[in-house]
Amino acid sequence: MASWKKIRAGTAFVAATLTTAAVLAMAPMHHVAPPIGPSAKPVKLTPPLMPAEAGKPLPKTILA
């Protein structure tokens, strides 16, 4: 006779398997990018902006 611990573990395994199968069945298999139109402009990647004081030491703050 199987113990209750094994029955609960088996039930949890079956529930997890069915949940995973349901999620994968509802998820689309692959994402298709929309076609590029004739008026589409390329996206320009810019470097991160640097502050004006880059490289200068930080000002000393006086705690009063």
Image (cartoon, rainbow, N blue to C red):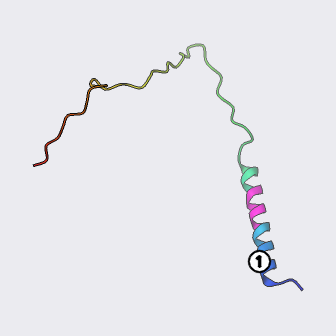
Residue farthest toward the bottom in the current orientation of the protein: 1
> Relative to 50, does residue 4 appear above or below in the rendering?
below
Q: SS class of the residue under badge 1?
A: helix
Q: Position of residue 27 (x, y in %)?
A: 71, 47
Q: Position of residue 28 (x, y in %)?
A: 72, 43
Residue farthest toward the right in the current orientation of the protein: 1
Of the 4 image quadrants, the one containing the N terminus is: bottom right
Residue 16 part of the magenta-drawn span: yes
Q: Nearer the viewer, residue 61 or 5?
A: 61
Q: Position of residue 53 (x, y in %)?
A: 27, 25
Q: Is residue 26 left or right of residue 38?
A: right
Q: Which amino acid, mark 1?
A: Arg
Residue farthest toward the top in the current orientation of the protein: 38
Q: Nearer the viewer, residue 54 or 12?
A: 54
Q: Residue at x 77, y 74 (%)?
A: 9
Chain part drawn in magenta = 15-21
Q: Is residue 30 left or right of residue 1?
A: left
Q: Residue at x 42, y 26 (%)?
A: 48
To which residue does mark 1 refer?
A: 8
User: Dividing the picture into quarters, in which one does residue 55 lie?
Assistant: top left
Q: Is residue 35 left or right of residue 53?
A: right
> Relative to 26, does residue 54 appear above or below in the rendering?
above
> Relative to 10, does residue 22 appear above or below in the rendering?
above
User: Dividing the picture into quarters, in which one does residue 57 lie?
Assistant: top left
What secondary structure characterizes most of the magenta part? helix
Residue 35 part of the magenta-drawn span: no
Q: Residue at x 74, y 64 (%)?
A: 16
> Relative to 59, does residue 13 appear above or below in the rendering?
below
